[in-house]
Image (cartoon, grey):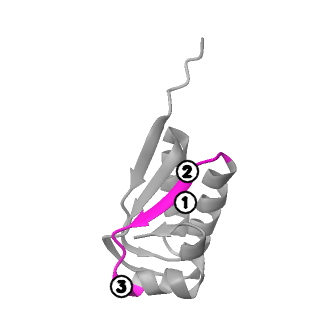
Amino acid sequence: MSDAPSKTSRAAVQPEGTITAATADEFRMRLQSALDQSSDELIIDLANVNMIDSKGLAVFVQCHKTISASGGRLRVVGASPDLKQLFHVMGLDGHFSVE
């Protein structure tokens, strides 16, 4: 019998402000903690995020690769039109759901 906590089917993270080089490591740690809780689906709610730079986008890519490797999926929700466009221009919306 294992003492490890059981994983849920879904976990969510709701960052605020910006996801940039200055905040990317903290964001990555929050995502890893959420991934430790969920093996099926990770939802990132961007309703309170107004900017993402290249370092921030790299965190999304890394998270997608990690959860996909275990058969799970990444969903990005609450993105502003500008952030949706950023994900589209970078081609990331072809790899994971951006709603």
The x and y percentages for residue 35 are: 54, 47
Say if 75 sits above or below 41 in the image.
Answer: below
- Say whether disc 2 or disc 3 marks the residue closer to the N-terminus: 2
Say if 99 sits above or below 52 in the image.
Answer: above
> Which label was assigned to residue 81?
3
Q: Which stretch is magenta?
A: 70-82
Tag 2's secondary structure?
helix
Q: Is the residue under label 3 in contact with that under label 1 (CB below 8 Å)?
A: no
Left or right placement of residue 2 versus residue 46 in this view? right
Q: What residue is disc 1 on?
A: 28
Kind of residue at badge 2: Gln
Q: Residue furthest left?
A: 48
Packing grade of label 2 (10 A; few <14, some 14-19, many >=20) is: some
Tag 1's secondary structure?
helix
Q: Is residue 4 magenta?
A: no
Measure the C-alpha gap from mark 1 to mark 3. 23 Å
Left or right placement of residue 74 versus residue 16 in this view? right
Kind of residue at badge 1: Arg
- Say whether disc 1 or disc 3 marks the residue closer to the N-terminus: 1
Tag 3's secondary structure?
helix
Packing grade of label 1 (10 A; few <14, some 14-19, many >=20) is: some
- Locate the N terminus and report the quarter of the image it occupies: top right
Q: Residue furthest right?
A: 69
Measure the C-alpha gap from mark 2 to mark 1. 6 Å
Q: Is the residue under label 1 in contact with that under label 2 (CB below 8 Å)?
A: yes
Measure the C-alpha gap from mark 2 to mark 3. 26 Å
Kind of residue at badge 3: Pro
Q: Which residue lies at the image location 60% right of the left edge and 61% below the top edge?
A: 64
- Locate the C terminus and report the quarter of the image it occupies: bottom left
